[in-house]
Image (tube, helix red, strand yellow):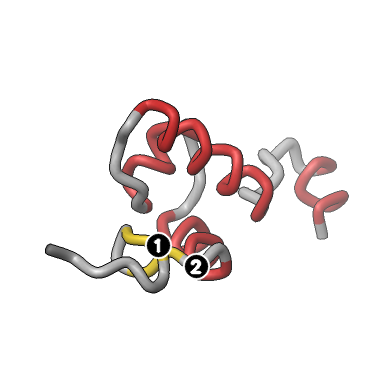
Amino acid sequence: MKQQKELRGGRPGITLEDVRAATERLKEQGRLIGPVNVRLELGHGSYSTIQRHLRSLGYVNAMPAGHKKT
């Protein structure tokens, strides 16, 4: 599928590694980790794909899993 996108001239999709790197950069900057900030950091990507990858990394509602809001 990735090869087909490249043949059509499309941009490859957002990967889990892309999102992981973006979350690390956001942490370093002290910014909230969520789909909007991740997309701003990456410069492209669908919110649904970014959200799916964030969940895979343990982020739920822009907070790490197990983190309690105070």
In this picture, is 62 found above or below 7?
below
- Identify the disc placed on residue 58: 2
Seen in the image, is 44 located left or right of residue 34?
right
Q: Position of residue 5 (x, y in %)?
A: 76, 48
24 or 52, which is in the foreground? 24
Q: Position of residue 1 (x, y in %)?
A: 82, 60
Q: State the CA–CA distance, disc 2 to disc 1.
A: 6 Å
What is the three-letter code of the residue carrying label 2? Gly
Seen in the image, is 4 located left or right of residue 31?
right
Instruction: Tell me if mark 1 has few (under 14), some (14-19) or many (20+) residues whose alpha carbon lies within 10 angstroms of its own.
Output: some
Q: Residue at x 32, y 58 (%)?
A: 62
Q: Position of residue 34 (x, y in %)?
A: 34, 52
Q: Picture quarter containing residue 60?
A: bottom left
Q: Picture quarter containing residue 8?
A: top right
Q: Position of residue 64 (x, y in %)?
A: 40, 62
51 or 32, which is in the foreground? 32
Label 2 sits on a secondary structure element that is: loop
* Residue that numbered label 1 is attached to: 64
Q: Residue at x 80, y 41 (%)?
A: 6
In this picture, is 55 found above or below 50?
below
What is the three-letter code of the residue carrying label 1? Pro
Q: Residue at x 59, y 47 (%)?
A: 20
Quadrant for the C terminus in the image: bottom left
Q: Earlier in the sequence, mark 2 or mark 1?
A: 2
